[in-house]
Every structure is written in structure tokens, then in C-alpha cells.
């Protein structure tokens, strides 16, 4: 009998989701081991009330220059970028390991996954199995930006090719795993679009019962028959990925989509409401109010996204000897103070998505008028090249020349 484990990764504020995943997974696979990797400041007294759930802290993954990596990436980036390292560590002692995002619920055994690993080194699921370009988000254009496969799920079997894949993927993530789709980067996910070209025994699973989510609902419908959930009437529902899900508003499906209006998918809404109830119950210990530890210097000063980006590209040039950039009186904090990279009031800014653009109509119209004026002044050829340059410079990592070369 094979020795199998599954793992999820989250910060403390997402633990409630990880517990719902764990409960549903163990119901289907009580014989498997299950791990949660916590990407946050380590708390030796932190516990969760679940028998059989093992916790690994990110700093115990033995990532080289751990604190430098934790400073370079934001919470979403770092959670995703340690994934290959976590999988590799577990694959050393298991025959097969599956990764599942914490916002997943299991509904039936993952048999197609582990059967697929019997003759494959890596198994993945695509975002969807049918093309879609209907003017709504997400669609094929979005998948070109963010990757062919959804890396909320991946599984590997113990073999040389799987280890080679994880080593390659980890190196890319820990050096280039930024969320900057404007320059072709999408954390851990975009890299794996290349993996079928590099790893011959990778297998793509097209089972519509796997990884059902808002990005493939156009091709998948749910029904409940004989006390089992089915997809498209005949395929067992294995798991749903509740990405971009608001537990207080389950009817909207996901905040990062505009294809389905609230109430337009009653089949999905039934399972979403039940999932919401489980999340709210698991949240009774107030995990979601926990602040991400690596968002702050040791003295509690907030680390802005801009500072992270500039640090990430200046790390080797200016800060290579700084083992812990979080030090309250260290060189990185002084650099931030000197260059206006901290915020007044120490209050983090909201992370915006495409829905928020509607709230900035006046500002957007003003910017467009400025662009129209620039077009009039410099002419169409120079304006075209200016826009190409702005696309490049929109990544803060391409703006480091704004700082003095002096340390």
C-alpha cells in the first residue's frame, strides 16, 4: 500500500478555510496524512483543534535566506512560492503527495488523482476544458495572463522527474514568483504552463469533477442524485475550489468573475451556502482577524507593497549582507524612511481588483484626458512607444533607478 499525504498552505488568517478542507479530506481519505504549512511569524504556542492534522511552519521548510524571501514577497506571493519546497519535503517520505489550496472542499475520493500518479510523475488540472471568449471574466485572455493550469491543485509521485520538477519550479518561484501579470509573471502558476514541455511524464487530468471553480462554471453544472453530487449529470464531483469566495455573500459565486450574476447559478449556490456555513463555524476562534506577521518590521511598522518590490530588486546590490531585513533599526528600515516608502498612520492600503475600478470613474477620466493631451503634444508614433515603455515601467522592479546609487 502506498503512503500518501496531502498538504495545504496558508497564513493564520486562513486557518478556518484549511480546517474545512481538512475535515472534508479526512472524511474521504482517513488513511492519508494531512499537513498545513503556515506562512506567518512562528508562534510556538499556536494550536488547532483537529486530531490528525500536522502543522509545519514555513521557516522550518529550510528555505535559503528565508527572511529575505519573506520580505521580498507579499502574503499571497509567499504562500504560493513555498509550495514546491513543501511538496519536496513531504515527497522525501511519502510515495505521493497532493497539494490543495485551503479554500477547497472535498466531496468524493480523489481516485483519478492517485490513479493518475501510478504512471505519471506530476498531475495537473487545466483551468477549463473548453475555450471561452465571451467578453466576461475570466476567459482565454485571462488564462494567457495567469497560466494554463490552476495551481490550487497539483500532485506528484516519488520519482526523479517529480523531484526535478519541484527543484525547477521552486527556483523560479523563489526568484521570480511575483504577481505582475503586466510583465508576464503570475506567482507560482504561470511557470507551470511550461512544465509539459520540460517533463515528459506530466499528466493533465480533464475530469470535470476535479477543481470545479468560477473559472470553469460555464462548462460544468451540478446536480444532486442518490445522495451524491454530480457534474454534468454523470461525473462525480471530487472537489470545489471556492477561490475569491465571500462567506457572507455566497450567492455572488466569486468576486473575481462577472460572467454569472448573483442568483443565476442556483446549482452552485446550494453548495456555496453550505460551505459558507462551515467556514463561519470554523471561524469561531477568530482566525481571520490575525494580521500577517511578515507585513511588519519587528517594531510593528507596516511594510508597504512598494517597499517590498524595491527591496526585492535591490536585495543583492544593497542589502545582501542583511540576513533579517525586518530589523527595526536595520538598513532596510532606514532606506524606507529616507525614500518615503512608509505610510502615515501605519495603516495598510486596500488591495484592489477589477471591480474597484467602478469607484474611480473621475480619476480614470482625468488620467485619460492627460493621455489624450500627451497624444496631441507628441504625436501618434511617440505616444505608441511611450505606452510600451509605461507597460514596462509599471513593474516597480523596473524603477529602481529612481533611487540614488549610494547605500
Image (tube, grey):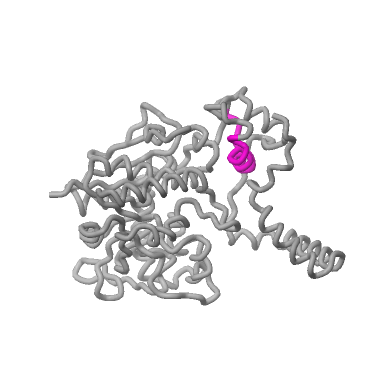
Q: Look at the picture and state if 283 lies above or below 191.
A: above
Does residue 283 appear anywhere in the picture? Answer: no
Residue 53, picture quadrant: top left
Q: Residue furthest top?
A: 329
Give the magenta-colored segment's residue range. Answer: 300-316
Q: Residue at x 59, y 61 (%)?
A: 354
Instruction: Tell me where residue 351 appears, x and y as whole percent.
Output: 58, 50
* In-image side of 141 versus 154 (left or right): right
Left or right of 258, for residue 26: left
Q: Indicate left or right for 233 with 388 as reference.
A: left
Q: Residue furthest left?
A: 1
Q: Can you say whether 68 is above or below 355 in the image? A: above
Q: Quadrant of residue 298?
A: top right
Q: Nearer the viewer, residue 204 or 197?
A: 197
Where does the C terminus fall, quadrant-wise?
Answer: top right
Nearest the eye: 59 or 392:
392
* Dominant SS type (magenta): helix
Vertical side of 100 occupied by 240: above or below: below
Residue sitting nearer the eye, 119 or 338: 119
- Residue 378: x %, y % from top left: 85, 65
The magenta stretch spans residue 174: no
Picture quadrant where residue 406 is located: top right
Magenta stretch containing residue 309, yes or no? yes
**In x, y percent, where is residue 273?**
37, 60
**Residue sitting at x 31%, y 56%:** 122
38 is higher (above) or lower (below) than 95: above
Residue in the picture at 34% in, 52% down: 100
- What residue lies at 49% left-to-right and 47% top-to-bottom? 76
Residue 258: x and y, percent?
Answer: 52, 68
Q: Is residue 165 visible?
A: yes
Amino acid at each position: 500500500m502506498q503512503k500518501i499525504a496531502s498538504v495545504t498552505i496558508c497564513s493564520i488568517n486562513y486557518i478556518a478555510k484549511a480546517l474545512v478542507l481538512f475535515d472534508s479530506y479526512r472524511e474521504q481519505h482517513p488513511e492519508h496524512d494531512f499537513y498545513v504549512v503556515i506562512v506567518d511569524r512562528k508562534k510556538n504556542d499556536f494550536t488547532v483543534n483537529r486530531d490528525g492534522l500536522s502543522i509545519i511552519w514555513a521557516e522550518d521548510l529550510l528555505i535559503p535566506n528565508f527572511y529575505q524571501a519573506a520580505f521580498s514577497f507579499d502574503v499571497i506571493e509567499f504562500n504560493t512560492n513555498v509550495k514546491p519546497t513543501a511538496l519536496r519535503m513531504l515527497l522525501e517520505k511519502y510515495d505521493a503527495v497532493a497539494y490543495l489550496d485551503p479554500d477547497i472542499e472535498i466531496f468524493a475520493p480523489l481516485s483519478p488523482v492517485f490513479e493518475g500518479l501510478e504512471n505519471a510523475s506530476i498531475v495537473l488540472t487545466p483551468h477549463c476544458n473548453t475555450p471561452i471568449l465571451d467578453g466576461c471574466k475570466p476567459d482565454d485572455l485571462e488564462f494567457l495572463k495567469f497560466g494554463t493550469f490552476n495551481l490550487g491543485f497539483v500532485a506528484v509521485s516519488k520519482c526523479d522527474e517529480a523531484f526535478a520538477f519541484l527543484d525547477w519550479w521552486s527556483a523560479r518561484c523563489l526568484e521570480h514568483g511575483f504577481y505582475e501579470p503586466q510583465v508576464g509573471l503570475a506567482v507560482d502558476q504561470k511557470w507551470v504552463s511550461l512544465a509539459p514541455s520540460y517533463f515528459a511524464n506530466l499528466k493533465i487530468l480533464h475530469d470535470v469533477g476535479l477543481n470545479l471553480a468560477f473559472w470553469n462554471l460555464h462548462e460544468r453544472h451540478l446536480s444532486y442524485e442518490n445522495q451524491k453530487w454530480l457534474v454534468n449529470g454523470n461525473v462525480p464531483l471530487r472537489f470545489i475550489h471556492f477561490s475569491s469566495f465571500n462567506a457572507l455573500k455566497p450567492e455572488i459565486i466569486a468576486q473575481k468573475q462577472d460572467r454569472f450574476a448573483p442568483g443565476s447559478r442556483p446549482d452552485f449556490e446550494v453548495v456555496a451556502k453550505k460551505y459558507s456555513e462551515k467556514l463561519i463555524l470554523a471561524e469561531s476562534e477568530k482566525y481571520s482577524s490575525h494580521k500577517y506577521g511578515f507585513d511588519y518590521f519587528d517594531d510593528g511598522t507596516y511594510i508597504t507593497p512598494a517597499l517590498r518590490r524595491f527591496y526585492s530588486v535591490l536585495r543583492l546590490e544593497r542589502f545582501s549582507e542583511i540576513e533579517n531585513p525586518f530589523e527595526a533599526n536595520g538598513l532596510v528600515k532606514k532606506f524606507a524612511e529616507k525614500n518615503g516608502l512608509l505610510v502615515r498612520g501605519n495603516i495598510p492600503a486596500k488591495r484592489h481588483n477589477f471591480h474597484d475600478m467602478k469607484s474611480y470613474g473621475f480619476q480614470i477620466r482625468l488620467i485619460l484626458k492627460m493621455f489624450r493631451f500627451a497624444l496631441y503634444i507628441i504625436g501618434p508614433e511617440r505616444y505608441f512607444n511611450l505606452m510600451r515603455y509605461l507597460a514596462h515601467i509599471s513593474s516597480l522592479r523596473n524603477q529602481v533607478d529612481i533611487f540614488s546609487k549610494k547605500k
